[in-house]
Image (cartoon, rainbow, N blue to C red):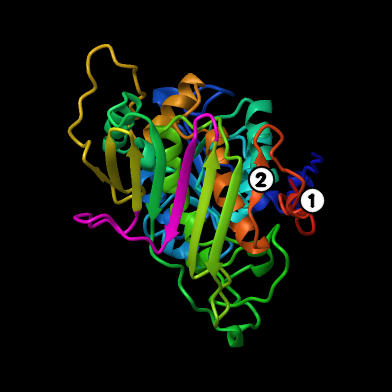
């Protein structure tokens, strides 16, 4: 895969003085591959809306600089940040600083790949929100960059770090359901909305060109930015890529699929009949696996099992019974295995101390985190393939080893994109 590195230093040469270096006590900052004094990891955050605000609240004492293309978002974020926290609009200023150990990427999905690859090149460890990428080629570049530059990359599928996740994983891996051959996921529909009549000039507080970045140019519309980017296939990809990344991350971890892939994916859906959003309102996806034989189904909408109040989740069917797992993101996990204690001598399952905490420990130890970029890429591929099968209107056969579709060059051409302007992987 060809890669073109963006010259941040050339771009910023004329404006470098605009961001003064942060002055810290000697020994606080980390040498490459090591935490600083008192294990303090100094972070630059890119993106301050949505989940970005949550992370900022949790990690405010370690975040030295925040970045956003929207000045209004920055101003709102500063109400949470420390008064001395610095701000900038262009994320490349963060990557060029030598006083930061790591970056937290909470920008919209279409930026994850470019930013994470460049952060690895700049010698920074990375926490990037899920889903890890919007194309398969982007995700592969992220894995390769993490390995080439020896970086720790944690992806924000925090379900694996929830307290009940360890018990559920232990329950399933210890064979309490026997051989699991089917997983049925349920979720509610994608919304319909967006008014094309609102297309027009971007407000002065927003750098629209930088918000778009590697995506193709489209006119500014307030119904396209911030939270609403999720409902466009090229930016977010709908529920199957948003919450689906959580539900499928758990299934992959529970069932030992982190290094495996399906052989076929089929997807059907009902496109919206009004508005700007282009993600299918309803959607049903089937992923077929071999070795082991397993079928995972995503139903949108799907019916939650009786007695389950969770708005989304999955039912695991084995030859000894079934297990319902409700939730998967910040709302927690609820299942019939919540009180399970693994028997003596059972295979150990890693128990995360928390998603941020796991990331910090791995930055110190240089071990791979619980949602390392490689399994996160594997999960993101499932979501990406689902949308491609829907868009093309036919089943797609997949070769996991080569990360290519079998005998379908049209589908293979959709595994990556060319980027826009200087924004390339």
Look at the picture and state if 38 lies above or below 224.
Answer: above
- Report the side of 383 relative to 315 (left or right): right
Residue 422 is situated, as x and y percent measured from the top left of the image, at: 78, 54
**Residue 229 occupies quadrant:** bottom right
Residue sitting at x 65%, y 63%? 393
Between 241 and 187, the one nearer to me in the picture: 187
Look at the picture and state if 271 lies above or below 399.
Answer: below
Counting residues from the start of the chain, the first of labels 1 and 2 encountered is 2
Q: Which residue is mark 1?
A: 409
Which residue occupies the extreme bottom position in the image? 197
In three-dimensional space, the C-alpha distance between marks 1 and 2, rounded to whole angstroms, equals: 12 Å
From the image, give the main secondary structure of the stretch colored magenta: loop
Q: Is residue 326 within the magenta segment? A: no
Tell me the mark number nearer the camera, choosing from 1 and 2.
Answer: 2
| Numbered range of the magenta stretch | 290-312
Residue sitting at x 52%, y 38%? 23
> Does any portion of residue 82 appear in the rendered image?
no
Q: Which mark is residue 397?
A: 2
Q: How many other residues sit within 10 Å of disc 1, few (<14), some (14-19) or many (≥20)?
A: few
> Does any portion of residue 347 appear in the rendered image?
yes
Which residue occupies the extreme front position in the image? 319
Look at the picture and state if 111 lies above or below 375.
Answer: below
Q: Which mark is residue 379?
A: none
């Amino acid at each position: 895969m060809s890669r073109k590195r963006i010259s941040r230093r050339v771009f910023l040469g004329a404006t470098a003085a605009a961001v003064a270096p942060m002055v810290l006590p000697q020994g606080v900052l980390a040498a490459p591959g090591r935490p600083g004094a008192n294990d303090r990891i100094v972070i630059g955050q890119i993106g301050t809306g949505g989940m970005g605000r949550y992370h900022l609240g949790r990690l405010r004492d370690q975040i030295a600089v925040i970045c956003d293309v929207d000045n209004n978002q920055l101003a709102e974020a500063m109400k949470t940040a420390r008064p001395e926290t610095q701000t900038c609009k262009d994320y490349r200023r963060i990557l060029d600083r030598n006083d930061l150990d790591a970056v937290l990427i909470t920008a919209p999905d279409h930026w994850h790949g470019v930013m994470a690859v460049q952060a690895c090149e700049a010698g920074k460890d990375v926490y990037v929100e899920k889903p890890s990428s919007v194309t398969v080629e982007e995700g592969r570049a992220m894995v390769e960059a993490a390995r080439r530059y020896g970086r720790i990359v944690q992806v924000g599928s925090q379900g694996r770090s929830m307290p009940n996740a360890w018990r559920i994983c232990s329950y399933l891996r210890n064979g309490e359901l026997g051989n699991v051959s089917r997983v049925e996921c349920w979720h509610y529909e994608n919304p319909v909305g967006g008014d094309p009549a609102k297309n027009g000039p971007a407000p002065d507080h927003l750098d629209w060109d930088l918000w778009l970045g590697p995506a193709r140019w489209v006119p500014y519309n307030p119904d396209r930015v911030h939270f609403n980017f999720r409902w466009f296939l090229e930016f977010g990809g709908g529920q199957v890529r948003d919450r689906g990344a959580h539900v499928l991350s758990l299934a992959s971890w529970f069932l030992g699929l982190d290094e495996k892939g399906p052989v076929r994916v089929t997807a059907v859906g009902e496109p919206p009949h009004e508005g700007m959003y282009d993600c299918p309102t309803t959607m049903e996806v089937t992923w077929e696996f071999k070795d082991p034989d397993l079928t995972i189904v995503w139903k949108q909408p799907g019916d939650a099992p009786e007695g389950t109040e969770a708005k989304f989740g999955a039912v695991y069917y084995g030859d000894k019974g079934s297990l319902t797992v409700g939730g998967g993101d910040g709302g927690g996990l609820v299942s019939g295995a919540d009180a399970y204690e693994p028997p003596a001598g059972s295979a150990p399952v890693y128990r995360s101390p928390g998603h941020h905490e796991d990331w910090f420990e791995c930055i110190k130890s240089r071990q791979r985190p619980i949602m390392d970029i490689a399994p996160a890429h594997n999960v993101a591929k499932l979501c990406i393939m689902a949308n491609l099968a829907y868009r093309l209107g036919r089943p797609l056969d997949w070769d996991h080893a080569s990360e290519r579709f079998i005998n379908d060059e049209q589908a293979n051409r959709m595994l990556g994109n060319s980027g826009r302007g200087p924004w390339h992987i």
